[in-house]
Image: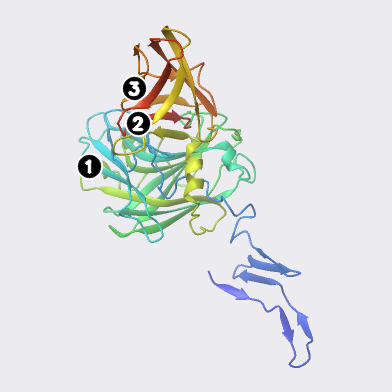
Amino acid sequence: MAGILKVDRIQEANSGQGVELSHKLVDTSGNTIISENNGVATFGSSVAPSTNYTFRNKIINGDMRIDQRNAGGASIFDFSNYTNTYFMDRWEGQFYNNYSGQATFQQISTDAPLGFSNSMKISCTQITNPQDANEQLYVEQQIEGQNLNGIEWYSSTPSTLTLSFYVKSNLTGTFPLTIKLSDNNSSHSSSSSRILPLKYEINSANTWERKTVTFTLDSYSGTRIISNTFAMSILFWFAAGSSRRGNTYNVWRTNSNAATSGLDNYTFANSTNNEIYLTGIQLEEGTVPTPFEHRPIGTELSLCQRYFQKIDNGGTGNHYTNFGLATSYAAGTYTFRFPVPLVTKMRANPSFSQTGNIVTLGVVSSSTTLRPADGGGNPVYGLELSASAGASNQTVIVRGDNDPTAALNFNAEL
């Protein structure tokens, strides 16, 4: 950006006298870059947002470091099964084709741009042939309304945001993005949602490139979500059938789940050679993309655990993590209940599932299928199971039995 530096003071040699001319650094259009008053410097709105500069990135796990579900393992999904699945923390994949095909989503630690350690890899592992009119392949992050305080939409003065990210692919050309806003509805699939089709270019094959897309939020007279439910999402499209295309670029409209028309690469799922990598995804207020906000790993993990927590059995080798303890009152069959303190309070009361080999010790017989006690809880989740104890004061232990995949999973995703 070219700029004109206006001199603050002209001073005669040896006199100490001078005339103040300006306290600003402006660009060629007259926009203030930096201004000064009584020794206090202020950045112009084109340089940095006027709101808090920390936690400016509204995307969680944008550098792909957190993968509680799979720890870097591949998630393979069939296009013939219409479904939305979270494969990495805060990142959800949608895939659909009436015929066939598979896509693989995976956290990668061996390929990332300078300054990053991880990326998200999406690859076509089985082609879709023929292409269905409703074919979809995209990854999405849904953003909670409470994380968008200070950002305005559905008003006469909506905020301008900048999305920046790093991308690498064997393909080149134009790829679609979609911004989605809820209209007073907690479901991101609601037909009343508003969408903005956008795009970006991949210029060089197999090369990490940083992309920037700036857009203004919707001035539509809707109801802005400011609660703990879905408010906004970012969708990166990789395949879209003919019925999923047709929207005008950079024009807000009522949701049709469609990508922008006239783009090049809707054939991502037509070759097993195709792959794409993403990382460094940042969404922030203002028109200038600032450097990616690298938050401490503990902070980023805690942000992810508001939506998903996995209490596991400790990895590889011999592990026997105790998930719960209870005591019998006398010999007989009981519903044993025990609490599981969650790491942090979650967005909402979570759903529960268990994986791997979980056993119950200290009882005559039992079911190893755990279930929520009285509907669960937040931040202390109650679990229960039915078991028969052989004596009073019998200690009942629920644990992962030498199985690194044994885990308790708590899900409060949007």
Alpha carbon distance from label 3 to label 1: 45 Å
In-front residue for pair 8/333: 333
Q: Secondary structure at mark 2?
A: loop
Alpha carbon distance from label 2 to label 3: 10 Å
Q: Amino acid at mark 2?
A: Tyr
Q: Secondary structure at mark 3?
A: strand
Residue at image position (60%, 67%) is 29
In-front residue for pair 38/130: 38
Q: Amino acid at mark 3?
A: Val
Q: Give left or right: position of 395 versus 82.
A: right
Lower sequence index among marks 2 and 1? 1
Label placed on residue 270: 1
Q: Give left or right: position of 209 versus 56.
A: left
Residue count near mark 2 (Cα–Cα under 10 Å), binned few <14, some 14–19, many ≥20: some
Determine which residue is flagged by label 2: 320
Instruction: Tell me if residue 380 comes above or below residue 105 in the rendering.
Output: above
Quarter-wise, where is residue 145 in the image? top right
